[in-house]
Image: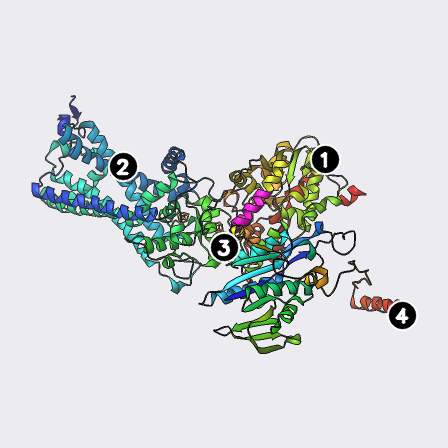
Amino acid sequence: MKILVPIKQVVTLDEDFEFTPDNRDVDHDFHIYDLNEWDDYSLEEALLIKESNDSPIEIIVCTVGNEYADESLRKCLAKGADRAIRVWSNELKNTDSIGIARIIAHIARREEPQLILTGVQSSDFAHSTTGVATAGILGWPYAAVVNRFEPDHDFTKASILRELEGGLEEAMNIDLPAVITIQVGINKPRYASLRGIKQAQSIPIEEATPDSLGMIDSEIGESGSASIIKKMFIPEKLSTAIIIEGTPAQQASKLAKIINDFKGV
Amino acid sequence: MHPIVTASGTFNPEQITRVVFQDFSPSTIRFFYVIGYLAIGLFLWNSFIEIRKYMRGKKNGSFKISCLVAGVKYMFSVLLTHRTLRRRDTLTGWMHAMIFFGFSVLLAGTSIITLQYDITAPLFGFKFWYGYFYLWFLLLMNIAGSAFITGLLYMMYRRNWLKPPKLDYTRPDREPNEYDRSSYRHEDWVFLWVMVTIGITGFLLAATRIIWLHDDPTVWGLRWWQPISTVIAYTLMHLGVNSNLAHILRNDLWWFHGLLALTFIALIPRTKAKHILTSAISLIFKDPMAAQRLPRSNPDEVSIGYSEITDFTWKHLLNLDACTKCGRCHEACPARATGAPLSPRDVILSLREFANRTMESQTLPNKAELSVHGKAVDQVFMETLWSCRTCMACVEICPVAIEHVPIIVQMRRKLVEDGDMDPILQKTLQTIHKSGNSFGESKRKRASWVKKLPFEIKDARNEDVDVAWFVGDYASFDPRNQKVTQSFARILKLLNIDFGLFFEGESNAGNDVRRVGEEGLYELLAENNIEMLRKSHFKRIITTDPHSYNTIRNEYPDFGGKFEIEHYTSYLARIIGWNQLTPTRKLNYTVTFHDPCHLGRFNKNYEAPREIIRALGLNLVEMERTRDNSFCCGAGGGRIWIPDVVGMEKPSQNRIREAAKIKDLEIFVVCCPKDLVMFEDAIKTSGHEGHFVVKELIELIAEAIELPTLETAVS
Ligand code: SF4
Ligand code: SF4
């Protein structure tokens, strides 16, 4: 049996950075890469399922990205994933989350996993759509923002808890195969030691392309996406915060003055 | 041959000897030999069991044959001077010296008799144990015997009346009802009593012989060559022991003494007495850099660190047996002193018990039963290992060269591999991996503190400089330390020193990452820094950070990076008093100085900071625990990244409490960025705020040479 864990190598930024000349992305020189935090939890969940099952389970991690993304895949391999697939070609540059979901769906058709576990969202773009879109394309059931996952012994059903707003939880049963998007906090992701990551260097990463996955042109890149990024910019500061200091009486009079100024009195 | 002339007559020297087995029937003598051989056989068998145990460990990577001669010399120099045993416990050290030398002479004496009786006389007809040689021998044996017994009696007095706390076997890592160390106490006492008994019966044998053979002028006439035995003989005679009774007594005593001594010998390898052998061997194989330079991991091994007892090197297994339970490390350990569940002694003793339980039998138990990590009474808790601050106080004081720190770090490597660590530590390691520093700041910001300076600093990566300054994480990113860092830059500038920085080329030096046990990350950091340093252009490196100093100086060479590096204190100590560095303002403060572990104990730089302190005219009052006995601030070994248990005293608070005992103390001087952070916090949290302040030595130098404040300097 297989579990597919799509992951994303996200970008974090420093305080100072610049945009690309076309203003559609941050200059790659300023990218700091890391494995998406949510995917750390979905991989851990897959590893825990594998470890608590007697029947052999293969965990496949996959991602869409150039060779920089190998680092995150290696980290997953170091933690115990069995196989890694990285899909890339230059046509994929401006692919949005729907386009990514199409690629994952192709991988899923080829690998036929019983379960797809992925993070609720990515920390850089925060669309929260890749997982559910994949389910939509595959026509599989899905559950999002899951914070407890318990498959039954033959992996045909699972009982889950979903985290809702206001501290509520929703208990559901779901038929497998399904796509589950995992919420942070569901488990405690293990540490991938540098030694483990180094040792994982020797595990080959399969490099696939949209072609090799059998995708057709209309599914690839911008054509397969539902949106395109037109512009990226830093929003103008709308207001500034002031800290009012002094004794309570002083604070009150300062506050009154600010309100009056604002009203134009 | 010259006759021996004495007041009681003139003797033929050949007659002056002791007839061995005098009046024994041949069959009794044979019986005794059988027992003697049996004892030797048992000794060898027991030794074999122990050696087999050590052989079940791994190869000792750091050892080279060429070091053996130096090692043997070192062992003798320690044993002959007893210098490691006299430290922080002088009287006990001297008493042990008496036991040791007494025992050695008595053993050598007995061996000499055997040498003549069993080897040289029957084989070559050569005899030497007579005449003056014999008489001096008697005198020496008398002196040795008295020293031996005196030392032992003192040890009994110490254990029973002085009762130093380090000798009670209380374990900080277990509840009192979880372990039973009474067998240790019993063994200690049996050991003392057996030895004292052997010593006393030895004297009684000599005394009864004098009485028994008082008619023999070669015995009686020369009795004062063994003064103590003779005094005892007179006493016995006074009590009514006559020649006949003495003969009978002597016969019984002879067997008692002989059998006891032989039993003792047979059991040496399996009892407390084994330290006679194991300590000496441990000293021979002492690695003088044990804590300063941690062992490299073998990239070919599937697992890393110490997980099972068979992962230990044979030398570390021997270390476990060399411990004499003297408690010096237990006393010095800052973790133990502040209530953490760690005592270096108990780590060693637990592991010893574990090794004895699992590895002394014919076959090894299966792998699962060999894991040293766990909750059993002879296993080591994860919490215990994480309590260590790798301050080296234990390794430094251990009289028999036991390597607690490498053992603990090796065990941590396994914990790190399994992710068994505090979540915050785990995050920090990931942060260091990602950004190259523990603050999670971008590399570009590493030298952002220079922006405030009114001058530019060269980039040693592409400009030639005399001195390249490795700043380290805390001095670069911590806001309080940045001020000190800026002052130091301005002092260098004032001195017209051609210096530069590595800017974003610098990564965390890795000293503490390595001591956490994240060896892979350490290797990455070290390799990055070494490559960067190699490409840079400098004559020497200086650093304001003792942690970086230690690893660059002592550990980078193992990775191919040999650089000349100095801590700023020794660099400035050489030039203080020159030109611009002449103090223009006398500072009259009463100060005390805290030796940073990594500068003092690790690298033996005790003097330079003190020289500067004196040159500044400060009134230095030392704390009780100073220099090699300096008490760790608690930041070492990655503990700065692990939150301390709430409600428990922190080592830094304990230290501040100690400093507060100094009358009129005004400034607590440090010269390590982590110390500055730790102690400023501790002063606030231990209620000493307002009494005295913590200052980095650089700040005092700046004050003494009247370096204008940065704000005035800029405007
Ligand atoms: S290194 Fe320091 S903290 Fe660690 S066991 Fe030794 S004395 Fe204790
Ligand atoms: S480890 Fe060394 S210092 Fe500690 S008790 Fe044993 S012999 Fe003494």
Question: Horizontally, is B169 left or right of A257 in the view?
Answer: left
Q: Chain under label 4?
A: A
Camera-side mark, 2 or 3: 3
Position of residue B446 measured from the top left corner of the image (x, y, whole percent): 68, 47
The magenta stretch is: B514-528
Q: CA distance from mark 2 to mark 4?
A: 101 Å
Circle 2: is it few (<14), some (14-19), or many (20+) Cα within 10 Å? many
Q: Which residue is mark 2?
A: B105
Q: Chain under label 3?
A: B
- For residue A235: magenta? no
Secondary element at image label 1:
helix
**Residue B623 in sight from this viewpoint:** yes
Amino acid type assigned to the residue bearing label 3 in the image = Glu
Position of residue B372 measured from the top left corner of the image (x, y, whole percent): 40, 56
- For residue B520: magenta? yes
Q: CA distance from mark 4 to mark 1?
A: 55 Å
Numbered badge on residue B153? none
Q: How is the image coloured?
A: rainbow
Camera-side mark, 4 or 3: 3
Numbered badge on residue B494? 1
**Same-chain check, marks 4 and 3:** no
Q: Chain under label 1?
A: B
> Mark 2 or mark 1, which has the lower sequence index?
2
**Residue B621 in sight from this viewpoint:** no
Numbered badge on residue B417? 3
